[in-house]
Image (cartoon, rainbow, N blue to C red):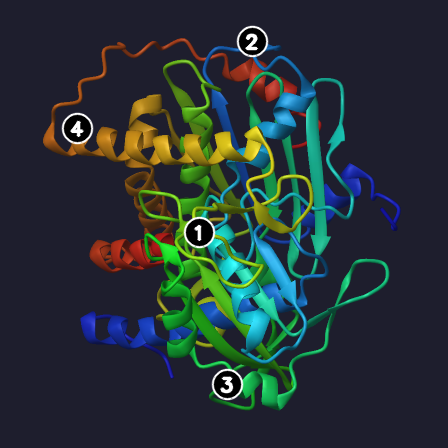
């Protein structure tokens, strides 16, 4: 089927683009061999007990990270700290109901955290993928206790040192969140000024461009 | 680090063996030690990389680690359909070469038929192009906010190996239109905005770049609004 020009075709095409985008992205995430700051793996577990609080903590931490991140459930850690793509048991997989998960997480995260729960089968194995968006204007703070896992008033983050979810461990992580919050405000302010025509750059264009120096510098690479 | 590190030229040759993107983001005035240390160069990438999809821009591969040279740090990736090298110089120049992922997907089955074909130099993914431009300009904006540049910066993007390639959807499951085929091998774009402009308008610039590429695929009436909507969805996750 070849799509032709015109708005109808484009709308139709967008639907397939969406499907294809997800497949490509999901493949990369599921097959990725190790955890990263923005990517957390968990072994197969049912949406129950402590796992709900631990996953909520991870979601809040990823939301406080620039660009957010992903949780992939169905990966087993090997002794060399790489991860095996094993998938989830059918019972564990079936226990994940996106609406229940959202209702639970919304009860702890303030302001509300934005995330999507995707149930996915890949190469005959089942996975849950949780895509977490970065906070919009203010960092996400835990608003109530849950067992010995979540505590009211805590800000959870992904550590800069190694990929783990913890409450803010050092001033570096705290400064990162503050800078990120300020950056967002500054950017929105600049965009608003530019949109309204109030922003006038005070710097006249300088024709001086040392392009040749830069070209020589990168010559061995390009 | 379990595997031997491939030679840089080996990775570069692999990238250039198919279609590839060449990106440079740099200040205008050359100052060899604009950035004080190599560690600062590394931190600039770590703290400002863009993660809007499963793969970050630029990606830092742990497999080979970030390596340092005379006045730069670099990182190589050779995993799955991703073949990349980037280098951040103390001068503030960022250089990134990466293969068109579409060319490294191997054999693709078209889902609506039993037909299969190998992918090299067949297509350029429509949305992936929009996403890549969005990531490039967002990354440039983040560097701009960190005072890497003075008043202006230059962002150059060149797509190599485009001749006879067509615009396709991701995974190349369908062609947009048989007429959207590129007649030239190289598409080069360059922009020199102020730092304030790139901070405030990076998304618009990404749309402009995407449109310019699509026009060179003989698609002159691209509906800009559709791209803006897709970009908005991408940015919101």
Whole-angstrom CA distance, mark 1 to mark 3, is 50 Å
| Pair 3/4: label in front | 4
Residue that numbered label 1 is attached to? A152
Residue A165 percent across, percent down from the top left: 60, 52
The reply to whether dot 1 and dot 4 touch (C-beta < 8 Å) is: no
Mark 2, other Cα within 10 Å: few <14 / some 14–19 / many ≥20? some
Viewport quadrant of the C terminus of chain A: top right
- The reply to the same-chain question for discs 2 and 1 is no
SS category of the residue bearing label 2: loop
Residue that numbered label 2 is attached to? B31
Q: Chain of mark 1?
A: A
SS category of the residue bearing label 4: helix
- The reply to the same-chain question for discs 1 and 3 is no
Residue that numbered label 3 is attached to? B111
Which residue is found at the position 36% from the left and 15% from the top? Answer: B151
Q: Is residue A124 visible?
A: yes
Residue A14 percent across, percent down from the top left: 32, 71
Q: Eyeballing the image, is B106 above or below B77?
A: below
Could you tell which of marks 2 and 3 lies nearer the N-terminus?
2
Which residue is found at the position 40% from the left and 78% from the top? Answer: A100
SS category of the residue bearing label 1: loop
Residue B36, by quadrant, is top right
The reply to whether dot 1 and dot 3 touch (C-beta < 8 Å) is: no
Residue B27 percent across, percent down from the top left: 47, 18
Residue that numbered label 4 is attached to? A193
- The reply to the same-chain question for discs 1 and 4 is yes
- Determine which of the numbered discs, if any, sits on residue A117 in the image: none
Q: Eyeballing the image, is B234 above or below A5?
A: above
């Amino acid at each position: 089927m070849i799509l032709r020009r015109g708005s109808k075709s484009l709308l139709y095409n967008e639907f397939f683009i969406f499907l294809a985008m997800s497949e490509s992205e999901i493949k990369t995430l599921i097959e990725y061999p190790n955890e990263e700051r923005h990517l957390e793996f968990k072994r197969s577990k049912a949406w129950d007990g402590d796992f709900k609080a631990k996953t909520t903590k991870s979601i809040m931490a990823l939301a406080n990270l620039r660009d957010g991140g992903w949780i992939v459930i169905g990966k087993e850690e090997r002794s060399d700290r790489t991860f095996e793509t094993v998938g989830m048991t059918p019972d564990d997989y079936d226990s994940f109901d996106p609406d229940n998960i959202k209702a639970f997480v919304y009860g702890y995260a303030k302001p509300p955290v934005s995330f999507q729960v995707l149930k996915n089968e890949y190469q005959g194995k089942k996975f849950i993928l949780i895509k977490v968006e970065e906070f919009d204007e203010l960092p996400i703070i835990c608003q109530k206790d849950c067992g010995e896992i979540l505590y009211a008033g805590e800000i959870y983050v992904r550590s800069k040192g190694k990929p783990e979810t913890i409450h803010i461990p050092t001033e570096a992580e705290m400064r990162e969140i503050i800078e990120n919050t300020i950056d967002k405000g500054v950017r929105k302010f600049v965009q608003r000024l530019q949109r309204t025509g109030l922003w006038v750059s005070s710097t006249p264009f300088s024709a001086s461009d040392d392009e040749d120096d830069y070209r020589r510098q990168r010559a061995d690479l390009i | 680090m379990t595997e031997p590190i491939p030679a840089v030229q080996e990775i570069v040759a692999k990238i250039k063996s198919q279609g590839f993107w060449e990106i440079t983001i740099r200040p205008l005035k050359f100052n060899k030690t604009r950035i004080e240390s190599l560690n600062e160069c590394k931190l600039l990438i770590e703290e400002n990389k863009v993660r809007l999809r499963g793969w970050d821009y630029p990606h830092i591969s742990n497999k080979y680690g970030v390596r340092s040279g005379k006045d730069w740090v670099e990182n190589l990736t050779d995993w799955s359909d991703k073949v990349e090298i980037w280098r951040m110089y103390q001068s503030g120049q960022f250089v990134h070469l990466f293969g068109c992922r579409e060319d490294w997907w191997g054999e693709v089955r078209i889902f609506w038929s039993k037909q299969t074909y190998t992918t090299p130099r067949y297509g350029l993914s429509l949305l992936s192009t929009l996403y890549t431009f969005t990531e490039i300009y967002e990354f440039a904006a983040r560097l701009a906010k960190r005072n890497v540049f003075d008043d202006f910066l230059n962002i150059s993007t060149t797509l190599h190996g485009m001749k006879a390639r067509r615009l396709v959807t991701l995974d190349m499951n369908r062609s947009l239109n048989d007429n959207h085929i590129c007649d030239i091998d190289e598409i080069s774009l360059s922009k020199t905005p102020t730092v304030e402009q790139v901070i405030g308008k990076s998304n618009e610039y990404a749309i402009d770049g995407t449109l310019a590429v699509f026009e060179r695929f003989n698609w002159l009436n691209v509906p800009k609004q559709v791209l803006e909507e897709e970009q908005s969805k991408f940015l919101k996750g």
